[in-house]
Structure formats: structure tokens, C-alpha cells
Amino acid sequence: MTAVLAESVARALCDDWAEQAEASSPSAARRPAGTDTPLRELSHWAATLRPQAVPCRVLKLAASQVLSQIASIRAGLQHPLGRKLVAAFGHPMQRDPRQAAGVFAALGSWLNLDDTAYAGHLSNSTVAVPLAFAYARRLDGLSLLTSVVVANECAARITASATLGPLRGQSAVHTHLAGAVAGRLHADRASASLYENAFGLAFAMPNWPLMRAFLASDARLFNTFTPVRTAMDACDAAYAGLRGAPDIMEHSDGFLARFATVPLPQAVAKGLGRRWHTDTLSFKMHPGGPGIDAAVDCAQEIHRELGPLRPQDVAEVVVEASLYTLFAGQRAAAYVTGPGSPLGALVLDVPYPVATTLLTGEFSVDDFSSPAVDDLDRWALAKRIRLEHDTEMTRQLFLSDAPFGEAVREAGELAVPWLRGFGGDELVDLVGAVRADNRDFSSSTKATGARVTVRLTDGRTISRTRLIPIGAAGPETRHSHADLVREKFLSVGGPHEVADTVDRLHRMRPSAVRRWIETAFLD
């Protein structure tokens, strides 16, 4: 295809999305910011947003996000622990959308195959809940996608306001209080007052996970299930007339006072309708959590060059990465001792997935269950892998928007104590003086890089480096996210019929959306 023809096709597709959005509804009224609380302003924006106000690139990202998260949910369904969850709470394709939303959320989250953004592991609620309610409420495809975008924007902003705090990544489960409330209420076309009250009620008693349970038990399956169910109760209560505190975010006795070391209440409503947090989406191509992606990408490249390895062929493997990767790996290391290690810790481990990839050439959800996880060769090689800090990768991490960079810029000098607590004076000096620049996120990046160096017993050394993992926010992902998530979906056995039609999701009528969702999960 020539460059001119490719540009013409791309423009036509963008016009198609824009035309469909324009035809769907009248323009949304904007309410001027003033004396309103951030939550009230966010609630009004969410309640009045209509599809034609969403850029087509954002709707396309949302479509890829839906397919990617369906892949994550399918992967969760296939795992033995996922089947136990279904035995306890039912299949996600069930009559009650509130219960279905919780099961969708749980199945898609605990293998760390869920998509992330600035800020938070959004898709576990921001896709799961709209899916359940689009099916139950018989929404058309464009309404489904718009609900996902609204949920993303609400959840990301509230998570961003507490990013400089003690909870991050999947442990920041309050993300899903916001994502679930917004995802359901936009599907319901609820009023701004209902959003405000449901948000206020949901955040009255926000969830705080205990790391012992998170790492050492199967309770990880509840890290999104529980807040989503709390959010469903908050919505029901708001519909019944119960009121929440509109200043629950910024009040001295409110959410940020407890959950943020450096509160950023201004992030809740900043740039509404101008800066789209959905632009910061990173798509997870490998299971496992934070920072393993680039290391696995590098290990795949090394395997392609060297071919199959044996543990005895390897003298040592060095994985250099940012402080973020090292921090997560250190928390998990005490729990990862070989076969039988708890899955909650194993999904945060770096040596096991790198060893597996070097030996087999890939890393998938099957590697978290028997017989793969019992393979002694993998564990023998994992023992020869050590992690080292790369200061330049840490610097690039904080220059990125996700997972922390934009929050540090927003906080400016106020971020220094948080930086010092995370990485000491060395990190404070490394990041340097920063300030908010009001970027719009359309060129967002997530540089969670790694360098993998394999030293063989025959004296050879091979090394590969990747700064932005495959699928993470950056120019490559903006160009090819549709192809990437299609590959992810098909790799977990997803039907071609679903993958081949996701680019038409925005034009599907309600009956077609229901068939599409059924095909995705009932094959």
C-alpha cells in the first residue's frame, strides 16, 4: 500500500468514527469551573459527555482496550483459580449485571494481564463494568465505547490525585471505585447528581489491601472484585436517594488526606475535554507485574538469536531496570521460593518470567500454572538471574507520563519528600527540578525499560535493551495498538469473529453488541 493510499484509508476510517459519534446525540453542555468541588465538576462532565466530543483516536484506543481486556478475562477464566472464582460467584455472562461486573473485574485482573494508564490499572473496572451493563442494558457499540472512555477519565484522574502515596499499581484498588461508578452510571445515562452521590458514597470507606494477603494468598483475586461490588452498592444507594459528601476528595478528613502523601486534588478535574487520560493507555502483552514487560521482550529477542538454552549453558543473567521494577521485585522475592510459590507474589517476580522466556521463547498465562510452574529447569535458571539498578532507566521513567512522571511534575517541589521516600536523595537529584507543563497526553509515553544480558558458560555474551515495552504507551503503540491487541486476543483462544469485527464496534446496534459479547465469552 502506498503512503498516499494508506493516509487516505486512515483518514476515511477516522471520518467514519467521527460521523458515527456526531449522529449519536446532541452536543453536551459544558459547565464552567468555579466554586464547585473537583468531584462535582468531574460528575457534571461525565454525565453530559457525548460521543461526538471524544476524539476518534481516543475511541479507537477504547475499542482496542475492550478487546485487550476481554483477552485478559478469557485468560483468567482458563486458569484453575479463575474456575474456582466462577464456581463461587457465577460465570460473568449472568443475569445480574452488578454481579457480572464483579466477576468480569476479578477474572481480568489477577494475572496482571490488564491494561494500565496514567494513572492506574484501569481496565479491570473501566471495561469490565461497561461490558456487563452494555449487555444488560442493550447498549449500542458507540455507547459502550463512550462509557469506557468516561470510566477511564474518571478513574484515571482520581487515581492520579493520590498517585504520590503509599499505594500504587494494582494495590491502588480505589481506582475501581471510580471506574465502576462511572462505567455503570454512564451506561445508565445517569444525572450529574447521581454521579456525585455515588462517588461520595463509594469513597466513604475506600479499600486498602494488606500486602501480606496480596502476595501470600489467593486473596489477590479480590483486588478488583471487592471495590467493584462496593461501587455497585454505592450506585444502588445513590439511586435510592442516599447522599455522599461532595468534598470527599479534598477535605481534611477525606480520601486524599489518608491515601496521598502529596495530595493532588487539582488532578481530578484538570483538562476535562482537552487532555484525555485514555491517550496514556499501555496494553499488557505479557502477564506479570510492573516492569517485567521490557525484560520479557528482551529475553524473547535473545532466545530468537540463541535458540533453546539449558540452565547449565548459562553462567549468569543480569536484568538492569528502573527503581520501579526493582521495588516490585524486592517485595515479591521473599515469597518466591520455587514450585508452589503463591501466585500473588509470582506475578510480580522478574527472574521466573525471564528464565521461562529464555528457555521457551515466550511467556504466557499458562506459565503460571502446572505443569509449567513446576519445571525445575526454569527455577534453576531463575536462581542465576540478578537485578541491578540502571539510573538512566529510572530517569527516563520519571520523564514519562506513566506511572509517576506526570504526578511528580504536577506536584513540583512538593514531590521531594515522596521521591526521597521512594528512592532516597539519589532519586531526588536524578529527577531534578520539575514542574507541570499542562501537556495533553496525545504523545504520552511509559518508559518502564530493561536490559537483559546473558553470559554463557562458553564465554559468549548477548545483551538486548528496550526502553518502552511492546504495547506500552509510545509512538509504536499509537500506530499499531489494534494489531497488538488482536494478537493478544487470538493468543488466548479468542474467536476470529470477534477480533475481525472490533473495528466496527462503534457501528454495532444493541443486538449486534450482545451477540459480539456472547461470542467473545461463550465460544
Image (cartoon, helix red, strand yellow):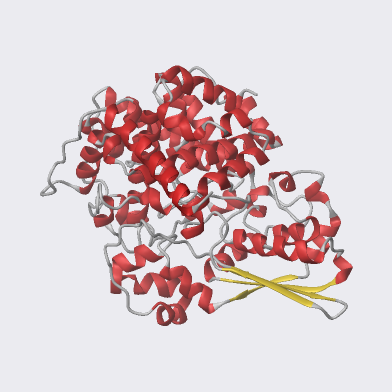
Q: How many marks?
A: 0
**In the rendered view, would you say 74 is above or below 391?**
above
Q: Nearer the viewer, residue 52 or 270?
A: 52
Judged left or right of residue 299, residue 400 is left
Q: Nearer the viewer, residue 479 or 485?
A: 479
Residue depicted at 36% across the width and 29% down the height: 143
- In percent of width and height, residue 430 lies at 44, 80
Please say whether residue 61 is visible from this viewpoint: no
Q: Nearer the viewer, residue 147 or 158?
A: 147
**In the rendered view, would you say 339 is above or below 179?**
below
Task: Quarter of the image for the C terminus: give it.
Answer: top right
- In percent of width and height, residue 58 lies at 38, 45
Judged left or right of residue 106, residue 273 is left
Instruction: Specify the quadrant of the image occupied by residue 357.
Output: bottom right
- In percent of width and height, residue 327 lies at 56, 66
Please say whether residue 140 is visible from this viewpoint: yes
Judged left or right of residue 73, residue 118 is left
Judged left or right of residue 293, residue 505 is left
Q: Nearer the viewer, residue 82 or 16?
A: 16
Residue depicted at 38% across the width and 62% down the height: 164
Instruction: Specify the quadrant of the image occupied by residue 15.
Output: top left
- In percent of width and height, residue 397 lies at 47, 68
